[in-house]
Image (cartoon, rainbow, N blue to C red):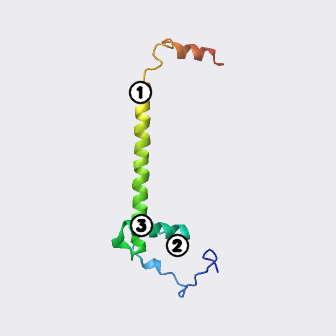
């Protein structure tokens, strides 16, 4: 039976999460091949948590957050540099009253 079709049978049918003291959302992640590979790579990066896959998963989430945040900061900085580099490039091309002249051409 492939891992994609493997069924997990739970011994207890009752809900046990209602006793967890949190109002925050909970998420369930199945250890698919992709997730297992990511956890194995994380175990190489953080060997002290090799035996605690849930801690590795949290580390991966934080590392992903940090990487995305860093990428967003870089994109914003690149845009800022592009704006500064091109600022004033069209100075003097348009007349001071150009916007009003364009609006005069628009239908009322």
Mark 3–mark 1 Cα distance, whole angstroms, equals 41 Å
Badge 2 local density, few (<14 within 10 Å), some, or many (20+)?
Answer: few
The total number of labels drawn is: 3
Which label sits on residue 42? Answer: 3
Badge 3 local density, few (<14 within 10 Å), some, or many (20+)?
Answer: many
Instruction: Give the residue at mark 2.
Output: 31
Q: Position of residue 88 (x, y in %)?
A: 43, 20
Residue at 38 percent of width and 65 percent of height: 45
Which of disc 3 and disc 2 is earlier in sequence? 2
In this picture, is 14 found above or below 91?
Answer: below
Residue at 44 percent of width and 31 percent of height: 82
- Say left or right for 108 vs 60: right
Q: Position of residue 50 (x, y in %)?
A: 38, 74
Badge 1 local density, few (<14 within 10 Å), some, or many (20+)?
Answer: few
Mark 2–mark 3 Cα distance, whole angstroms, equals 14 Å
Q: Position of residue 46 (x, y in %)?
A: 36, 67
Which of disc 1 and disc 2 is earlier in sequence? 2
Secondary structure of the residue carrying numbered label 2: loop
Examine the rendering and report whether any part of residue 23 can be seen: no
Instruction: Give the residue at mark 1.
Output: 85
Q: Nearer the viewer, residue 36 or 59?
A: 36
Residue at 64 percent of width and 81 percent of height: 1
């Amino acid at each position: 039976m492939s891992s994609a079709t493997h069924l997990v049978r739970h011994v207890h049918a009752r809900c046990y999460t209602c006793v967890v003291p949190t109002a925050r959302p909970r998420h369930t992640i199945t250890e698919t091949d992709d997730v297992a590979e990511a956890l194995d790579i994380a175990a190489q990066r953080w060997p002290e948590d090799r035996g605690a896959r849930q801690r590795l998963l949290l580390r991966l989430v934080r590392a992903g957050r940090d990487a995305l945040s860093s990428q967003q900061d870089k994109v914003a900085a690149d845009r800022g540099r592009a704006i500064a580099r091109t600022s004033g490039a069209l100075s003097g091309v348009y007349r001071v009253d150009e916007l009003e002249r364009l609006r005069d051409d628009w239908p009322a």
